[in-house]
Amino acid sequence: MLTPTPFYFLRHGETDWNRNRLIQGQADVPLNDLGHAQAESVRAAVEALPITTICCSPLLRARRTMEIVNRNICKPTVFVPELMECGLGEIQGQSSNGEWREPWVKGEFTPPSGETFLEYVARTIRGVNLALAQPGPMMMVGHGGNFWALEHFGLTAPGLRVGNCALFRLDPPRDTKLWSVSQLACPEGDALVIGEGAAP
């Protein structure tokens, strides 16, 4: 169960593997120039949030995004390994336009040396709960796959377009069993979106 506490979510900026539509998984790919610019473009929106702690995936693309948006506000940061992107094993570096995604989500395919979708969902929920145990309000800097996992757990807006450096607020259920999600900011221009041919 996800701890019923509001939090903020920021997806990392673009990488060359995103741009080239390659599966990243846990490959430690850095931001490209556009990814740095995207993080700069949402920095003011992050600075306006009433956050106390930033919790971050330790992968470089998330870590560098966090460093950029936290440069002026200098909030305490906690790295949470459970928030790393899905472990996709031997298919990392292959085309993200392959036919792996739907069978993986349905539990019909596990990448060699990778994890199942349900294992990844459970790990992400553990990671978010660890993050929510930190002093709040908390902002999480993570991956498109984290959002897949949260959608599977139950959001009011399944299939939401989550571009690089999109910033959201997530609120726990009130009258339903679903979490509500509101987009607060996103970079202008061409931002690759999970589930539309771009790698997570």
Image (tube, rainbow, N blue to C red):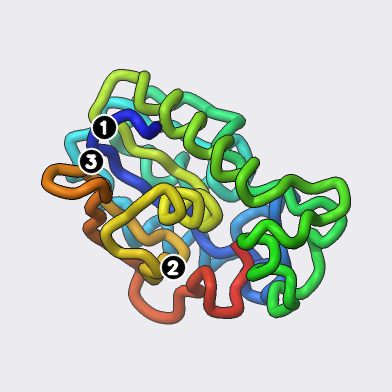
Q: CA separation, marks 1 and 3?
A: 5 Å
CB atoms of marks 1 and 3 within 8 Å: yes
Mark 2 or mark 3: name the one nearer the start of the chain.
2
Q: Which circle's residue, 1 or 3, is located before the other in the chain?
A: 1
**Residue nearest the viewer, comparing 33 with 120:** 120
Residue 4, disc: 1
How many marks are shown on the rendered structure? Answer: 3
Tell me the amino acid under the disc marked 3: Pro
Q: Residue at x 72, y 64 (%)?
A: 23
Q: Nearer the viewer, residue 128 or 176?
A: 176
Instruction: Specify which label sits upstream in the sequence, 1 or 2.
Output: 1
User: Residue 46: x and y, percent?
Assistant: 27, 47
Check disc 3: other Cα within 10 Å, few if <14, some if 14-19, many if 20+.
Answer: some
Residue 83 rendering spot, x and y as whole percentages: 55, 38
Residue 110: which disc? none
In-image side of 118 versus 50 (left or right):
right
State the residue at coordinates (65%, 49%).
86
Instruction: Point out residue 153 in the picture as x, y percentages from the top left corner.
Output: 42, 48
Give the residue pinned by disc 3: 172
User: Considering the numbered disc 2 on the image, is that residue within a helix, a strand or a loop?
Assistant: loop
What residue does disc 2 label?
163
Q: Secondary structure at mark 1?
A: loop
Residue 67's spot in the image, x, y percent? Answer: 46, 40
Please name the residue shown 54% across and 46% down the image: 62
Q: The C terminus is located in which quarter?
A: bottom right
* The quadrant where residue 92 appears: bottom right
Give the structural element (helix, strand or loop) at label 3.
Answer: loop
Amino acid type shown at disc 1? Pro
Mark 2–mark 3 Cα distance, whole angstroms, equals 22 Å
Q: Quadrant of the N terminus?
A: top left
